Image (cartoon, rainbow, N blue to C red):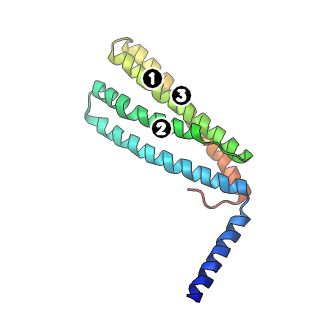
Amino acid sequence: MKTIKVLLTGLIMVALLVACTMPPEAQELVDYHNDIIDFTEEKGEEMDEIDSQMTNMSLEEAYELQLDEMLPIADEILEYVNAQSPESDIVVEYHDMRSAFVEKWYEAVYEELDVYGQFINDEITEDEFNMLLSDVEAMYIESAQLLEEAEDRLADFVEEYDLEELE
């Protein structure tokens, strides 16, 4: 019993020592990043599953599936990111960059579905449809660039704080 207490006390002291060596803002960054990655990966897998269901569907069926199942997931992702309230300057900076990415991506998702809806409902021609989809693709590219900027800034923080706990 005494050996267990000594071992547990030792483990707690090591854990506290490790926790104390990382500045609080660095720990907040690790927690923030890991949490957001866990959440968005899970939602991304759900979206991938929906995408795979659409391969043998008509355009109209795929559109309805996206409206019914994909948009609520996109809503959840945006709500999750917007609900975060980081405290330290570095996490606020990283959060703002991640938020810009998610908001642009979200805008592209909605715009894409709007374009498909207009086409399905014969509100636009095929040429207009292709032109508008090109605009949507540009939005997705911009969102990817925003994500890359956020990831580059995260890499700076990882180096600055010598972080190893990021997913």
Q: Residue 132, position in %: x, y?
A: 46, 19
Residue 90 coordinates in the image, percent (x, y): 72, 47
Residue nearest the viewer, comparing 137 with 108: 108
Label 1 crowd (10 A; few <14 / some 14-19 / many >=20): some
Q: Quadrant of the C terminus?
A: bottom right
Using the rendered view, name the quadrant where residue 98 is placed: top right
Residue annotated with mark 1: 133
Please tell me whether residue 76 is drawn above or below residue 23 in the rendered image: above
Contact check, label 1 and label 3, Cβ < 8 Å: no
Q: Earlier in the sequence, mark 2 or mark 1?
A: 2
Residue position for label 3: 139
| Residue depth check, mark 2 versus mark 3: number of the one nearer the observer | 2
Q: In percent of the image, x 42 and y 32: which residue is there?
A: 71
Residue 81 image position (x, y, % from top left): 56, 40
- At label 2, the amino acid type is Glu
In this rendered view, identify the residue nearer to me: 95 or 4. 4
Q: State whether residue 150 is above or below residue 166.
A: above
Distance, label 2 to label 3, CA atoms, is: 20 Å
Residue at 45% across, 23% down: 133
Ranked by sequence position, the earlier of labels 2 and 3 is 2
Residue type, label 3: Met
Q: CA distance from mark 2 to mark 1?
A: 24 Å
